[in-house]
Amino acid sequence: MNHRITCLLLGCVFVWGIAGVRAQQPAGAAAPIGGAERWYQQLIAALDGMQADLPKISQSASEAAGMYVKENLPIAAVGDRVFAFEAVGRCGGMMSIEHVNPAKQPQWKGIVLYGLQGPGLADEDARQIQLLHDRGCKIVAFGRSEWITQNAAAKAIDWAIDIHTTGPDGLFATADGKRIVPVHEAANVLALWTWTGEFVAACTREGKMPTMYRGFVFAGGQERATKIGKAKFHDIAPTPAEPLVSGQTYLRELRKCLVALHATQMNQIKEAAGMASATRAAGKKMYCLADGHTVGNMFRRPYDPGFFIELGPWSPSEVIPPLQADELLFALGYTSPFMYDIGKAGLEACSKSGICVIGAARALDEPVKTKLPKMLFIDENWPDEDCIVQFPGYDIKVLPPSGVMQLAVYEMICAEMVEPGTPAGK
């Protein structure tokens, strides 16, 4: 019997809930709907909240864009690492956005998109926000409304973007009270791109089109960026974009991606969770080879459950350790489960070791199919170009869904490991 089948069978009989984690299911209650379903429902509720808030989001973006254009201010993403690194150097994102360390760049002054890190790091958030405010920066804070209003630096925030998550800050609590499996990180990213769409639209109404990236893994992306260079705006005057349209489009198209993931991949997500739970119960190592701006920065974070050992181009060590056949590797990829040099090394190591493999990406490419024919594959369900908004007359689509979708796959697997619902296929 191969390892994938063994893991699945063990996962189906494994007592629900990871040791040391309280899923907080009342005694005598009906079987839980499952952590993956709960996580999905909470993110959809956050999306609904932002949809209702779109006029307010658009207004704040319009005011900030006016300053950006007229005062020639720089713009940066700061705060939560998942949020900040998703914004910078990103396919479909603004080419001029920076990542600023307030303590190490004391002369920097501009518009700051600040992703709040949650109540556990509220003091750190307050210090950074106040520091940036005191030097004259304009702050756009993204987070739960109570995190913003109750923050010690709340008066230093110029615009507040509510991400509309509810309940505990992580779906589950460990025995020592640590909250794990967050929804707010994905909601922060969802809000970031919704706001960015309205910001870019407002810039076009000011007569400027910000330069935007085409992803370097897509045809012509790197050459296009080289041609544009460090230009903040394109030379040609843009077609003005109406307010609310880009935000509505992003929210609508991202919802389609999430609904498709839920409709077509939930059984695979549950199967993956069962395999991982069985491997963990057996005391064996589990690795996550994560490639992406969001998923590459979610490890070593306060809310990550720590089920997987971090690997990948964003990790401290870009080395694939010796793998064993009774272990598990989760290749959480982008256009392929295994990308770049570390991915190629990982694919070879997986093939030679016979380790149990879960793969997730936009597509399953032939080399991976050939090397790992028994791999469980999860389709991340984002479009080929990884961009879902078209501005009038612009040469590419912009604003990526993949960061949210990659987080959704990872967090739903972790949530289902803690709180299994109906077994896959039932």
Image: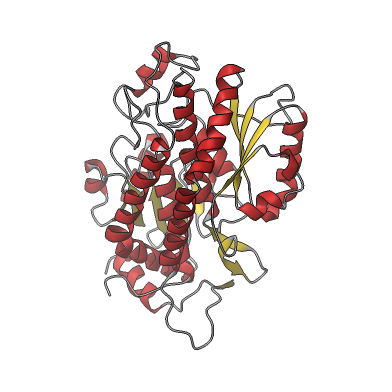
Q: Nearer the viewer, residue 182 or 175?
A: 182
Residue at 25%, 57% in the rendered image:
374
- Residue at figure coordinates x 57%, y 61% from the top left: 170
> What percent of the width, then of the height, locates residue 369?
23, 48
Q: Compared with residue 404, is residue 140 higher up or lower down, i.e. above or below?
A: above
| Viewer can see residue 373 | yes
Q: Nearer the viewer, residue 27 or 17?
A: 27
**In the rendered image, which quarter contains the N terminus?**
bottom left
The residue at the far top in this view is: 235
Residue drawn at 52 percent across, 71 percent down: 18
Quarter of the figure that contains the C terminus: bottom left
Q: Is residue 358 left or right of residue 304?
A: left
Instruction: Please say whether residue 355 is visible from this viewpoint.
Output: no
Residue 160 locus on image (x, y percent):
62, 43
> In the figure, residue 358 lies in which quadrant?
bottom left
Q: Nearer the viewer, residue 329 or 139?
A: 139
Q: How is the image coloured?
A: secondary structure
Q: Nearer the viewer, residue 86 or 208?
A: 208
Residue pictured at 67% horizontal, 49% vertical: 148
Residue 207 at x, y percent in the picture: 46, 17
Q: Is residue 318 above or below residue 138?
A: below
Q: Is residue 67 above or below residue 43?
A: above
Residue 78, image x and y in percent? 62, 36
Position of residue 42 relative to residue 227, above or below, is below
